[in-house]
Amino acid sequence: MACLSILAGAAHAQGDGGAQKGAEQKKNPQAEQPVTPPPQPVIRSPSSEAKPAEQAPPKSKVYQPDCDSPRDHDQADLCAQRKMAKVAEDTYHLTLAQVAIGTLGLIAIIITLGFTARANKATSIAAQAAVDAVNAERAWMSPENIDITLSSNVIVDDLERGPAFMFQARWYNGGRSPAIRANIFIDIKFMPYDSEAPHFEVEILPGSGIVGPGLRSNSIRLPIYGDNYRKFLDQDLSVFVYSRIWYAITAHKDILVYTESCTEIKKNGIVTRRDGQASPNIEQRLVGPQNDAI
């Protein structure tokens, strides 16, 4: 009963308090309602957090087999593999060294070839300059003309042959030094009119003549007479005159050089001279391959 009385008193007290509180709220309707503050973030300092203790990594041990006296087959096989790897590495480095040495050697060869080429070029230029100097001062014999004269009665082999044309080769030294040991050869051939140039065979015929610079020298005269003379005037044949001169130059007295020429001579109609006289028109020109100078 005492307990029930206490509970009843407490309930009555709470009822009186609630009624009183409700009356106060009715009396002051604008009273502030309680505000619940927002939750604040919890900021933790890194130093305040507990850190696990750092542990050192375990140390690895490199396995080193005893290759001098391996214990078993696996260890011996590992030692053999290591030796092969070592040999391969040494071979690789040796190959690199050989390649480097070969490259340096190739560069040296190229440089040497370059210097050799320059030296050869300089030697060639010097040699050519010497040749040019000699050639500038040497004798140069060249054909100047075939002189043609008319004979009213030519004598051949102590016999009178009647009228004839006489052909003589004239040579000129256009060099700066004399031509020594000079000898002039001449030959003629008769061919149908406007034929190709024939070939002349000739042997080396050294002489003893001297032709000074700027001077001329003539061959002997060769005639055309009889039927050939008449056919020549009738324009039935052409005359080919071949001449060659051998000579030596002062720089090389023991070496003979030569110049050769082949000239075609033919009649081409009649011309009237200033005095009113008619005469055959004789033409000449160099023909054929035997026109050369050495």
Image (cartoon, grey):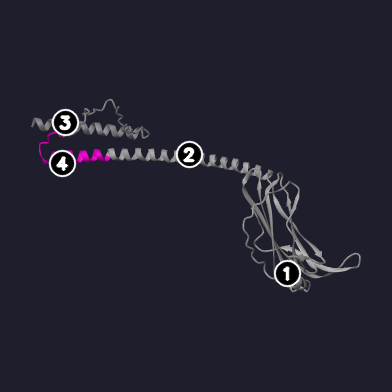
- Which amino acid does the dot numbered 4 rest on? Asp
- Residue range in magenta is 67-88
Earlier-in-chain disc, 2 versus 1: 2
Q: Residue at x 75, y 64 (%)?
A: 284
Position in image of residue 192 (x %, y %): 70, 73
Single out the mark in the foreground, 3 or 1: 1
* Picture disc at residue 238: 1
Looking at the rendered image, the quarter that the N terminus falls into is top left
Residue 73 shown in magenta: yes
Q: CA distance from mark 4 to mark 2?
A: 52 Å
* Picture disc at residue 9: 3
Q: Which residue is mark 2?
A: 112
Q: Residue at x 35, y 37 (%)?
A: 97
Q: CA distance from mark 2 to mark 1?
A: 63 Å
Earlier-in-chain disc, 4 versus 3: 3
Q: Is residue 111 left or right of residue 209?
A: left
Q: Which residue is mark 4?
A: 77
- Which amino acid does the dot numbered 1 rest on? Ser
